[in-house]
Image (cartoon, rainbow, N blue to C red):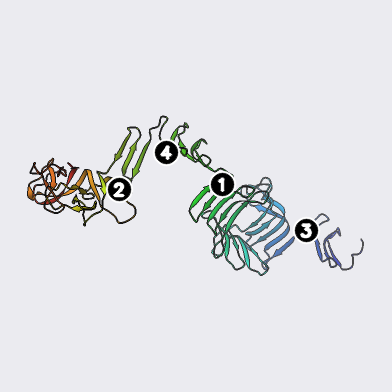
């Protein structure tokens, strides 16, 4: 046998004198194995229990039903264990084909398991944590966190809510999606709160502008449409940016609603479908209906009223007369032929139609000119029976029974819908000026 090279220590097996371990001082190498033997690096703790192995690894599964232990993995890699034998890190693991635990094509790195949560922490050159994968400092598993150099969270994935957070704590986060040419196609901007989609040449196809809460589709040479399809991929709703039209169709493709920008017309129903327009109040109760089947307009409230300027303060239920300068005043004269109507809003009735409403300026009372309205009455001048004609009285703002037929023409306010026999009160009447 040739003498060993100077500076090299060979450890040979006996009796074959085959070199199994070489310590090469010149190259600073350690070579283990060869010549028919596998080379492994095995570390034991003070109690003699194996805690780490680098080289050939076999994982054994004891099975009481099997006469011999089952080999579930046989590979070359790195394995680190606790003193009780629990695996902490496995690198290069390949399960055997008949393993009941892992698929035969698995190759990877495993951290944690069997009572231990894993964490992979990447530090920068200043030893500051920049990326955490696994368990965070609060003991939450399955996290992905990216930190700035100042320790602020820039990106975080929360597996509990399946939520990805981008930006925060002084750093605005954006999500940018590029195409294969590296051009920005989709951007979610945290700084502006905007969402934009662009063509390959940078032109806007879609923009949500948070400053005006506006969604813009199309533009810059591209027509924008919004199309909603059903489960069968049939177009049911379309906002046509090229034509400026809006339409809704049923499953058979028949129009249910169409806004035609050419004639500025809104069409509801048609082609076998009756169209209705229903308006509800804050309690979900129908107040207005345009009935396409019957051709009717249905108003749930009672009277037709019109707003007027007032010469003095008026209350709901007051009888009003025409004063100077087109202003109305509370009635004070019996059989006043200037009678104009009753201020709406008393009792349970409300106006169905209000004319001459002005959005700007002071609020003006609405006076019922026709229909049902609650009116203040005074039976001191005679009992009132349902169906009696009513006129103004000497009591300010109150009506009374029309007892003198010779004075009634031109002064009749309406007809009583309820009997009132004593004193003052409020009853529903039918306003029929005559």
C-beta proximity under 8 Å, tags 3 and 4: no
Q: Which residue is mark 4?
A: 266
| Sequence order check, earlier mark of 3 and 2 | 3
The circle on residue 39 is 3
- Helix, strand or loop at mark 4: strand
Mark 3 or mark 4, whichever is nearer to me: 4
Mark 3 or mark 2, whichever is nearer to me: 2
Q: Which residue is mark 2?
A: 356
Query: Could you tell me which residue is drawn at 48 percent across and 54 percent down?
Result: 212
- Helix, strand or loop at mark 3: loop
The one nearer the camera, 211 or 133, is 211
| Residue 95 rendering spot, x and y as whole percentages | 68, 49
Query: Could you tell me which residue is drawn at 54 percent across and 43 percent down?
Result: 224
Distance (Cα) linking label 4 and label 2: 25 Å
- Does 22 sit above or below residue 161? below
Q: Which residue is mark 1?
A: 219
The quadrant the N terminus occupies is bottom right
- Does 15 sit above or below residue 96? below
The quadrant the C terminus occupies is top left
């Amino acid at each position: 046998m040739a003498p060993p090279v100077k500076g090299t220590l060979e450890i040979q097996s006996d009796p074959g004198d085959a070199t199994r371990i070489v310590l090469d001082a010149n190259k600073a190498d350690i070579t283990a194995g060869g010549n028919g033997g596998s080379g492994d690096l095995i570390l034991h703790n003070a109690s003699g229990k194996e805690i780490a192995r680098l080289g050939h690894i076999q994982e054994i599964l004891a099975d009481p039903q099997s006469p011999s232990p089952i080999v579930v993995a046989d590979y070359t890699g790195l394995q680190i264990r606790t003193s009780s034998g629990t695996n902490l890190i496995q690198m290069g693991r390949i399960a055997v084909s008949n393993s009941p635990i892992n698929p035969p094509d698995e190759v990877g790195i495993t951290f944690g398991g069997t009572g231990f949560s894993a964490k992979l922490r990447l530090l920068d050159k200043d030893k500051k944590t920049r990326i955490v994968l696994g368990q965070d400092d609060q003991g939450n598993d399955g996290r992905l966190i990216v930190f700035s150099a100042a320790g602020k969270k820039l990106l975080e994935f929360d597996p509990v809510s399946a939520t990805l957070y981008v930006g925060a704590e002084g750093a605005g986060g954006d999500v940018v999606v590029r195409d294969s040419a590296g051009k920005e196609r989709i951007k979610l901007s945290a700084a502006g709160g905007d969402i934009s989609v662009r063509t390959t040449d940078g032109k806007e196809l879609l923009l949500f502008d948070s400053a005006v809460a506006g969604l813009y589709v199309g533009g810059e040479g591209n027509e924008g449409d919004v199309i909603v399809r059903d489960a069968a991929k049939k177009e049911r709703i379309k906002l046509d940016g090229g034509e400026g039209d809006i339409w809704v169709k049923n499953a058979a493709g028949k129009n249910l609603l169409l806004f035609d920008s050419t004639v500025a017309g809104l069409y509801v129903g048609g082609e076998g479908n009756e169209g209705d327009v229903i308006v509800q109040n804050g309690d979900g109760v129908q107040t207005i209906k345009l009935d396409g089947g019957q051709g009717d307009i249905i108003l749930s409230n009672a009277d037709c009223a019109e707003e007027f300027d007032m010469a003095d303060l008026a209350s709901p239920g007051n009888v009003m007369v025409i004063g100077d300068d087109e202003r109305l005043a509370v009635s004070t004269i019996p059989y006043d032929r200037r009678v104009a109507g009753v201020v709406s809003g008393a009792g349970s009735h409300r106006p169905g139609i209000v004319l001459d409403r002005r959005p700007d300026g002071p609020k003006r009372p609405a006076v019922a000119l026709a229909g049902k309205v609650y009116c203040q009455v005074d039976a001191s001048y005679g009992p009132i029976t349902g169906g009696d004609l009513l006129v103004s009285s000497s009591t300010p703002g109150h009506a009374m029974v029309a007892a003198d037929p010779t004075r009634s023409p031109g002064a009749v306010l309406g007809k009583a819908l309820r009997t009132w026999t004593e004193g003052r009160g409020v009853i529903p009447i039918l306003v029929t000026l005559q």
